[in-house]
Image: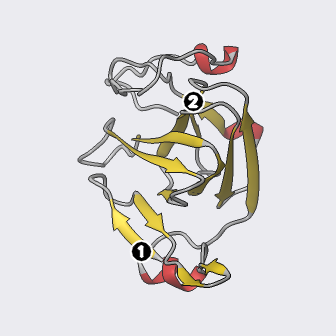
């Protein structure tokens, strides 16, 4: 796998190295030892699939608070998405900054998002499916979110937003004077 750190420390775009022959290709998409060698959380306890009907759908920005913070490895298995991570780490020099990667079924790229980040995405085509590996099981009492359109972040969503659920639309804006939970 090829690991490329983004402008925000700890967030990586990961590309599988394809070994090709007349049959097609083979590639490693997960290696505990490669994650450990880079100081990334290798503990993946849960896998999720998300399917989205419409282009322009936004999901997020989600995170789990302590003690159930989660690292995520996100891959698009059908369609295309604009995947976003917002740094919420209180001691980070890049706090409230975001980074994004275009993940598609064709490019097979993945985004590694460490603990302390809110995560969300926008679909770029109809019928987009996402596969997540997550370092922590879901704990509803620890689930939190921040607004996908919070002006503090100024996320440049590439498509017109056509679908957001009520929960994601009603998360509060962050007050920079107060740490999010």
Name the foreground residue: 93 vs 46.
46
Q: In the picture, residue 46 is in which quadrant? A: bottom right
Question: Spatial distance from mark 2 to mark 1, Cα to Cα?
Answer: 30 Å
Q: Is disc 1 placed on a helix, strand or loop?
A: strand
Residue at the farthest left position: 93
Residue at the farthest front position: 22
Q: Position of residue 5 (x, y in %)?
A: 33, 63
Kindly tell me whether residue 64 is visible in this rendering.
Answer: no
- Direction from residue 23 to residue 157 in the image, left or right: left
Residue 145 circle label: 2
Q: Position of residue 61 (x, y in %)?
A: 54, 32
Q: Between disc 2 and disc 1, whose residue precedes? A: 1
Q: Residue at x 68, y 18 (%)?
A: 165
Residue 181 vertical placement versus 80 (above, below)? above
Q: Which residue is mark 1?
A: 2
Q: Position of residue 25 (x, y in %)?
A: 61, 78
Q: Residues within 10 Å of mark 2 (few under 14, many from 20)?
A: many
């Amino acid at each position: 796998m090829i690991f490329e750190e983004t402008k925000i420390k700890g967030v990586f775009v990961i590309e599988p190295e394809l070994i090709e022959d007349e049959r097609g290709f083979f590639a490693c998409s997960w290696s505990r030892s490669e994650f450990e060698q880079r100081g990334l959380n290798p503990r993946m306890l849960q896998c999720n699939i998300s399917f989205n009907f419409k282009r322009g759908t936004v999901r997020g920005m989600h995170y789990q608070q302590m003690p159930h913070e989660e690292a995520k490895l996100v891959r698009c298995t059908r369609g295309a998405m604009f995947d976003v991570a917002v740094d919420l780490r209180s001691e980070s020099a890049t706090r409230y900054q975001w980074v994004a990667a275009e993940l598609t079924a064709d490019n097979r790229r993945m985004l590694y998002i460490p603990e302390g980040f809110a995560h969300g995405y926008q679909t770029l085509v109809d019928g987009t499916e996402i596969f997540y590996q997550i370092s922590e099981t879901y704990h509803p009492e620890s689930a939190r979110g921040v607004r996908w359109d919070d002006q503090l972040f100024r996320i440049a969503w590439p498509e017109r937003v056509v679908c957001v659920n009520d929960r994601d639309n009603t998360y509060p804006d962050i007050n920079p004077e107060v740490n999010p939970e």
